[in-house]
Image (tube, rainbow, N blue to C red):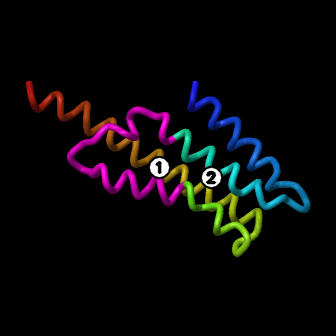
Amino acid sequence: MLPAFALLITAAGVGLLLEDHPPHIAAWLACVGIGIHLLGTRVFLVADRRVSGLARALLLVATFQLGRLQPALGAYAYVWLLAAWVVMCAVLTTRMARGDEHAGDVDR
């Protein structure tokens, strides 16, 4: 339930960012939604050999702080930044999941 709720928060923030004069809260809605989604995703939080738990914790803290960049970037550039950030997190998560599957094969 938590990841689905987080996606709704993110969608609301991105929708507000795409308006003519977005409110400042829109940037925070988008980045907090992404952070909550990452927190609710089990594969992102499970430790593996490649990416330490400290690196994941720093990535989460950075995700929640992305809202500070919106005034400097502008709304559209900020949406592109969020898109790139989410793709980077997805690649990291996919690599971790794939690494866990192969690690089970080696242990057999």
Which region shows up in magenta? 38-63
Q: Kindly identify which numbered label has been placed on residue 89.
A: 1
Residue 3 sits in which quadrant?
top right
Residue 56 belongs to magenta span:
yes
The amino acid pointed to by label 1 is Cys
* Residue at (20% x, 46% y) in the render: 49
* Residue at (70% x, 40% y) in the render: 9
Q: Nearer the viewer, residue 47 or 77?
A: 47
Query: In this rendering, is residue 4 above or below 85?
Result: above
Instruction: Identify the main secondary structure in magenta.
Output: helix
The amino acid pointed to by label 2 is Cys
For this orientation, the residue located farthest to the left is 108
- Residue 100: where, in percent of width, then height? 25, 34
Residue beneath disc 2:
31
The answer to whether 103 appears left or right of 21 in the picture is left
* Residue at (62% x, 56% y) in the render: 82
Residue 96 belongs to magenta span:
no
- Residue 20: where, in percent of width, then height? 91, 60
For this orientation, the residue located farthest to the bottom is 72
Q: Nearer the viewer, residue 24 or 11?
A: 24
The answer to whether 20 appears left or right of 57 in the picture is right
- Residue 93: where, in percent of width, then height? 40, 42
The answer to whether 11 appears left or right of 87 in the picture is right
Pointer 2: residues within 10 angstroms few (<14), some, or many (20+)? many
Question: Mark 1 near mark 2, Cβ–Cβ under 8 Å?
Answer: no
Quarter of the C terminus within the rendering = top left
Residue 8 sits in which quadrant?
top right
Give the secondary structure at mark 2.
helix
State the separation of the CA atoms marked 1 and 2: 13 Å
Which of marks 2 and 1 precedes in the sequence?
2
